[in-house]
Amino acid sequence: MPDVIAADGTIRNDNWVVVARPAEGDSLDIPEGQPALIPADLWLAGYEHFAGRTDIGVWFDSHDEPELLEGKVNELPLIAVNFPRFVDGRGYSIGRLLRERFGYTGELRAIGDVLLDQLQFMKRCGFDSYVLRADKDITKAARCLNFFSETYQAAVDNDVPLFRRRAS
């Protein structure tokens, strides 16, 4: 199992399994006795079966719309957003929407092609845990989460822009 990095820089073992979308005609294969992340639309389709379970979370692909789970996001212990390629920035928008528009308060995780130099930007968009791409050095993650001492713009992690912080 890969390790996961928390927003405070701590590294812990990741016991969540990302369940791939089944092929057309196949059923969802959720591992027994292990917390699992399933595609968000399949969680919604099986809502009666999955609601209230603390061992089932969801993952969004970069083309998925977070509006899909409007009103239900805080029923989930973990939401992951897949970054299929490091150049695909749609996951940042999904993170901000989940936090700011839909009020998600649980763990928001970045998965997929996650690189060290993206971590602080993901944190600013509301992500609070990260699974790095397998070829990246996880021991460097804590430094990358706080690379900049000050930020100019308002974001999820600080909703007051620098010019207002200086004025007060």
Image (cartoon, helix red, strand yellow):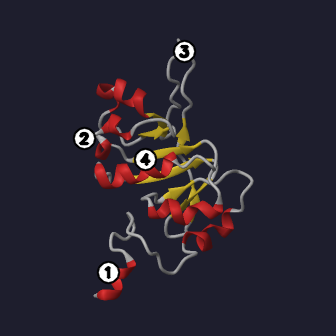
Instruction: Select label 1 or label 2 by which is in front.
Output: 1
Q: CA distance from mark 4 to mark 2?
A: 15 Å
- Left/right of residue 41 with respect to residue 109 in the rendered view: left
Ranked by sequence position, the earlier of labels 3 and 4 is 3
Q: Is residue 14 above or below residue 147?
A: above
Dot 1 or dot 2: first in sequence order is: 2
In this rendering, the answer to whether 43 lies above or below 121 is above
- Residue under pointer 3: 24
Label 2 SS:
loop
| In this rendering, position of residue 115 left or right of residue 52 | right
Tell me which corner region of the image, top left, top right, bottom left or bottom right, holds residue 120.
bottom right
Mark 3 and mark 1: Cα distance apart in space = 52 Å
Q: Residue furthest left?
A: 71
- Between tags 3 and 4, which lies in front? 4
The residue tagged 1 is 164
Q: Amino acid at mark 2?
A: Gly
Name the mark nearer the viewer: 1 or 4.
1
Q: In 3D space, how far apart are the residues under numbered discs 1 and 4 (Cα atoms)?
A: 26 Å
Q: Residue at horizontal 30%, vertical 38%? A: 52
For label 2, the residue is: 71
Which mark sits nearer the N-terminus, 4 or 2?
2
Label 1 close to label 4 by CB (< 8 Å)? no
Residue 3's x, y, as percent?
61, 55
The first of marks 3 and 1 along the sequence is 3
Measure the alpha-carbon separation of dots 3 and 2: 28 Å
* Position of the C terminus by quadrant: bottom left
Specify which label sits upstream in the sequence, 3 or 2: 3
Amino acid marked by disc 1: Arg
Inspect the image, locate mark 3, and give the three-letter code of the amino acid beneath it: Glu
**What numbered label is drawn on residue 94?**
4
- Residue 151: % across, % down: 46, 75
Extreme-top residue of the structure: 25
